[in-house]
């Protein structure tokens, strides 16, 4: 049974973990346990907690499931509410609970004010995850101000934990970073209106866990707007953990009879280190989060012309590129920025989603037909939430952007942000994209967002400050409506690279643009960090030209290919400048990729070696007794040319056929996992793909 109840205690069980909570004699909904599986609910107790002194209240000392500001709590609480008469605390009774299948709902109701909070716990037993979210309900006739409303609160007994998140930047996303939580608070927050390149709505809390060992407590928020994660070392021998919408610049007026739903936070526990955590999350994404229409299909090999042409797109040049991309074996041809309005640089035309008739005199149709003739689907780039000052849209609707009346409008990449809280703006964006999809045979849309949010507006601020929640939810609404009307179209989430990689976008998009940085060495690091939380299938990775534009680094084409093939392969090179020899190598690898991509996109990932800690870098994907191993030697040492690599995830007694350097031989799973593969690697930027298959 996934949910057990005994007396005042609830026990939530997945196959591998347990989570317990209970109502104590102070009436608090207390967090009791999170960790390895304990089947017997009878073991759990609610030991008494007394005020320790005038300075340490019982409420502050208790690990709670829904602590609220007030009642002499001084830790960061999971909610903060103000009633119409200024009372600033939520004192509740547990009104009741309901269990429907694997869903537990507990209702807390204020002892005086007409206000309820429902806490939801959905147990994904097989997937080893628990989904948490909350709802605030105003039952009365006066408005209630909600100043903080996280999705979930967790506690972990003990101290000396570390919290891991990212410490990234544009072109350097997913740089893993850990800090101790031994005193005070550690906060990870985005106020950029989107997830950002810097941090991610996730926490991994552990005690020095590594790839294959250690306990990891983790949670991921299904949200793409401003978020906050707080890990607080309390003076009471527990760490309090909060995850949800950021309370900075947030206050929501809940009108009479209104409700507010928090986004979902998925929680998992692993006693097998980060590797087990990642495999659990990847499986969960495919099984429960990704859009159903594409979650079971492999992604196509795409060609994107951005790095080749930038804004300089034209019918003729794109036709040529399409022919070459088709010959190489690409299956999807994407025209990036520059096809609309008068977009010759990033100063103009965002918002004017009509084809530039100077660049495409007969519209997009002739190019699309040609792309199809050479065997590919057609895709296009847009950035719907933005507008340039130099655009017809802004000239006609200067009031459609976020702006303060007595201030200059803030820009980022020379663009303003459309006010998505306005229904007419939502309608305009939907209609503009819908028109493109109705007019043209478009199979894929790359949806970009190239700046952080700035100001809101005077009118919006007078009503309270939950603008970025409304913005985020209307962004979801638009794409949801588009997907409903055009179910066959694939969407890619991009925000100058990986600024919008989160489980919120995963619900609506089929893939992410991982980073604008396509340098293969930097990518090894970015892709490794990404893989802790996000699945390979969603990780678009392109082979581009060398030297790379971002850092002038030159890397051989095979290494670049092997790096990009570890995700969903794309080509972004300028095919007009490519030698015959390079084209042949790319063609051959695309062919190989098509044969093995199912293992990569749906397989279980094992991070075997990390080039910053080991002699070389290696990752392995395993699916149905087939395995693909990517090996990268960044720098050769002292003429060393033999390396050993122990594989993982195979059957001990199974005999496997190994294809290594074009030579095929047999070994058992036991040999491959205990003795290891012998790899010939030499020099700088050597790399290979080893194929392993059940005999
Ligand atoms: C962003 C994206 C790039 C490209 C450009 C186009 O930077 O991340 O991939 O689409 O915009 O302007």
Image: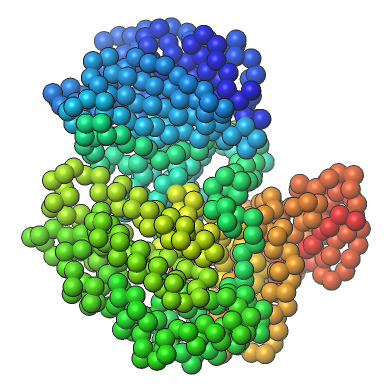
Q: Quadrant of ligand 1?
A: bottom left
Q: Residue furthest left?
A: 406
Quadrant where the C terminus is found in the figure: bottom right
Q: How is the image coloured?
A: rainbow
Placement of 301 over or under 403, stated as above or below: below
Q: Give how far across and how far down residue 467 sits, in percent.
A: 25, 49
Q: Identify which residue is drawn at 84% across, 51% down.
A: 672
Q: Identify which residue is drawn at 29% across, 65% down.
A: 428
Residue 136 visible in the displayed image? yes
Q: Report the number of numbered marks.
A: 0
Viewer-closest of 642 and 230: 230
Residue 685 is left or right of residue 76, and the answer is right
Viewer-closest of 468 and 106: 106
Placement of 159 over or under 127, stated as above or below: above
Q: Identify which residue is drawn at 43% across, 81% down.
A: 310
Viewer-closest of 629 and 9: 9
Q: Give how far across and how far down residue 640 sits, in percent.
A: 76, 65
Q: Give how far across and how far down residue 185 sits, in percent.
A: 36, 34
Viewer-closest of 399 and 414: 399
Quarter of the rendering containing residue 227: top left
Residue 675 visible in the displayed image? no
Quadrant where the N terminus is found in the figure: top right
Residue 163 is left or right of residue 409, and the answer is right
């Amino acid at each position: 049974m996934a949910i057990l109840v005994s007396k005042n205690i609830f026990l939530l069980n997945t196959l591998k973990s347990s989570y317990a909570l209970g109502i104590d004699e102070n009436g608090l909904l207390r967090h009791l346990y999170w960790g390895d599986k304990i089947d017997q609910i009878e073991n759990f107790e609610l030991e008494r907690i007394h005020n320790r002194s005038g300075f340490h209240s019982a409420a502050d000392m208790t690990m709670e499931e829904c602590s609220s500001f007030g009642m002499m709590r001084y830790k960061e609480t999971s909610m903060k509410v103000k009633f119409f008469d200024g009372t600033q605390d939520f004192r509740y009774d547990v009104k009741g609970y309901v269990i429907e299948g694997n869903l537990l709902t507990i209702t807390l109701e204020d002892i005086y004010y007409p206000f309820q909070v429902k806490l939801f716990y959905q147990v994904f037993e097989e997937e080893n995850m628990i989904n948490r979210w909350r709802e605030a309900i105003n039952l009365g006739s006066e408005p209630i101000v909600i100043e903080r409303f996280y999705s979930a609160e967790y506690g972990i007994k003990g101290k000396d934990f570390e919290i891991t998140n990212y410490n990234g930047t544009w072109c350097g996303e997913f740089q893993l970073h850990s800090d101790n939580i031994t005193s005070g608070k550690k906060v990870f927050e985005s106020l950029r209106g989107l997830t950002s390149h810097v941090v991610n709505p996730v926490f991994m809390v552990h005690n020095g866990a590594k790839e294959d060992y250690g306990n990891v407590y983790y949670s991921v928020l299904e949200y793409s707007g401003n978020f906050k994660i707080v890990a607080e070392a309390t003076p009471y021998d527990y760490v309090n953990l909060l995850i949800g919408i950021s309370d900075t610049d947030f206050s929501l007026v809940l009108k009479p009879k209104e409700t507010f739903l928090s986004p979902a936070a998925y929680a998992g526990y692993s006693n097998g280190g980060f590797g087990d955590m990642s495999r659990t999350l990847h499986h969960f994404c495919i099984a429960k989060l990704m859009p159903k229409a594409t979650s079971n299909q492999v992604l196509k090999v795409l060609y994107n012309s951005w790095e080749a042409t930038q804004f300089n797109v034209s019918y003729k040049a794109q036709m040529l590129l399409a022919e070459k991309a088709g010959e190489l074996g690409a299956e999807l041809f994407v025209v990036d920025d520059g096809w609309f309005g008068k977009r010759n640089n990033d100063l103009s035309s965002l918002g004017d989603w009509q084809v530039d008739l100077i660049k495409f005199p007969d519209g997009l149709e002739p190019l699309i037909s040609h792309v199809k003739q050479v065997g590919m689907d057609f895709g296009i780039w847009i950035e719907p939430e933005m507008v340039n000052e130099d655009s017809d849209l802004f000239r006609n609707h200067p009031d459609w952007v976020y702006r303060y009346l007595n201030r200059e409008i803030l820009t980022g990449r020379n663009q303003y942000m459309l006010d998505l809280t306005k229904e007419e703006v939502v309608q305009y964006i939907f209609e503009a994209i819908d028109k493109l999809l109705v007019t043209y045979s478009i199979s894929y849309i790359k949806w970009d967002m190239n700046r952080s949010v700035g100001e809101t507006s005077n009118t919006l601020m007078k009503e309270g400050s939950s603008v970025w929640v409304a913005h985020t939810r209307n962004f979801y609404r638009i794409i949801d409506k588009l997907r409903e009307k055009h179910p066959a179209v694939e969407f890619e989430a991009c925000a100058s690279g990986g600024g919008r990689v989160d489980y919120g976008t995963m619900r609506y998009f089929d893939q992410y643009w991982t980073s604008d940085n396509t340098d293969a060495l930097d990518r090894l690091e970015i892709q490794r960090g990404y893989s802790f939380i996000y699945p390979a299938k969603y990780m678009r990775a392109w082979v581009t030209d060398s030297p790379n534009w971002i850092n002038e680094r030159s890397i051989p084409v095979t290494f670049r290919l092997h790096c990009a093939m570890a995700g969903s392969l794309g080509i972004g090179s300028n095919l007009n400048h490519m030698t015959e020899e390079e084209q042949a190598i790319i063609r051959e690898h695309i062919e190989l990729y098509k044969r093995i991509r199912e293992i990569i996109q749906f397989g279980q990932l094992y991070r075997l070696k990390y080039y910053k800690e080991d002699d070389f870098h290696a990752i392995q994907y395993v699916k149905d007794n087939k395995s693909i191993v990517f090996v990268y030697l960044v720098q050769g040492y002292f003429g060393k040319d033999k390396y050993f690599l122990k594989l993982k995830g195979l059957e001990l007694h199974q005999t496997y056929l190994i294809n290594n350097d074009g030579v095929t031989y047999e070994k058992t799973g036991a040999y491959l996992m205990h003795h290891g593969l012998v790899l010939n690697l030499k020099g700088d930027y050597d790399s290979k793909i080893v194929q392993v298959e059940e005999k």
